[in-house]
Image: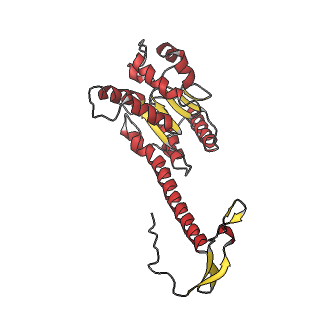
């Protein structure tokens, strides 16, 4: 905050004037108060000392408010980089421009994400669902899209959370009273941000193709988060089909995940992580 200096001494050339300030002649029961504010002549300028004081007070309040607003905006901006939960730190380098496009499906899906970003910046609210083969770049696109929103200059907050990593941190907090990563911490944090990515929904239950049903604990956490985000946009990445999701989770939860959706589906894109394996 800029330092505001106050003169140590008043100007020497001050004389009182017979004229009273019209703004500070107080009236009560139709009668003027006996002691109105008398104007002063300071360096040849006729002013009301009370008006000048109020003007300085207003300038100070506006300066403090600007500083406070800037701090809030900076806090929102830093949420994405300080509080996101990743399972793979290499995703930190993910940007839209370095998402490799080799096939038509990848090209079309990247374009859909770009169009969705334009809609988000325009204030539209919907959920972006990225579904399909593992290693297709769903998390890359989701993180890159959030980064783009976060860097847009809008007064918004963004957060990327790998669901499996989050659940592990919450479970660890059960036996660690010093841990800040409690269930209530995540529910509050993820409920407040403007744009949230829930990465790899379903992975917390085990391997792809599992017949497991999500535990009551997992469903409770996800239900609490999605319930509070009905008026906000959420990105979701998953390898699982809608049939599998409906088998694993309560229908109400899936309905909230798929509320007002825009789908980005990978059917043909191969696992980019497996391309260079020589055997």
Is residue 105 something one can see in this rendering? yes
Q: Is residue 201 left or right of residue 123?
A: left
- Of residues 105 and 165, the one drawn nearer to the viewer in this rendering: 165
For the N terminus, the quadrant is bottom left
- x, y percent for residue 186: 41, 32
Q: Which residue is painted at 64% across and 38% down in the image?
A: 124
- Of residues 98 and 17, the one drawn nearer to the viewer in this rendering: 17
- x, y percent for residue 189: 44, 36
Is residue 272 something one can see in this rendering? no
- x, y percent for residue 234: 54, 33
Q: Is residue 118 above or below residue 87?
A: below
For the C terminus, the quadrant is top left
- x, y percent for residue 156: 54, 45
Place residue 86 in its image quadrant: top left
Q: Which residue is painted at 52% across and 20% down in the image?
A: 253
Q: Is residue 34 above or below residue 219?
A: below
């Amino acid at each position: 905050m800029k330092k505001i200096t106050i003169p140590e001494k008043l100007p020497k050339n001050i004389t009182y004037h017979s004229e009273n300030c019209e703004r500070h002649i107080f009236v009560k029961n139709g009668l003027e108060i006996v002691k109105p504010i008398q104007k002063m002549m300071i360096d040849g300028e006729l002013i009301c000392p009370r008006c000048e004081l109020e003007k300085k007070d207003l300038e100070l309040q506006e300066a403090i408010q600007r500083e406070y607003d800037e701090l809030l905006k900076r806090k929102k901006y830093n949420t994405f980089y300080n509080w996101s939960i990743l399972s793979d730190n290499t995703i930190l380098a993910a940007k839209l421009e370095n998402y490799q496009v080799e096939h038509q499906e990848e090209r079309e899906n990247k374009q859909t994400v770009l169009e969705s970003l334009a809609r988000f910046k325009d204030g539209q609210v919907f959920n972006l669902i990225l579904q399909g083969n593992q290693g297709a770049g769903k998390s890359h696109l989701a993180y890159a899209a959030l980064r783009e929103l976060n860097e847009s200059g809008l007064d918004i907050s963004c957060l990327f959370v790998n669901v499996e990593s989050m659940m592990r941190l919450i479970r660890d907090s059960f036996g660690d009273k010093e841990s800040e990563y409690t269930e209530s911490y995540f529910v509050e944090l993820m409920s407040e941000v403007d744009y949230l990515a829930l990465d790899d929904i379903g992975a917390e239950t085990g391997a792809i193709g599992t017949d497991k049903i999500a535990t009551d604990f997992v469903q409770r956490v996800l239900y609490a988060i999605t319930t509070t985000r009905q008026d906000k946009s959420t990105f979701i990445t998953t390898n699982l089909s809608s049939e599998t999701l409906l088998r694993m989770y309560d229908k109400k939860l899936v309905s909230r995940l798929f509320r007002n959706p825009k789908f980005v589906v990978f059917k043909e894109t191969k696992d980019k992580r497996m391309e260079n394996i020589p055997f």
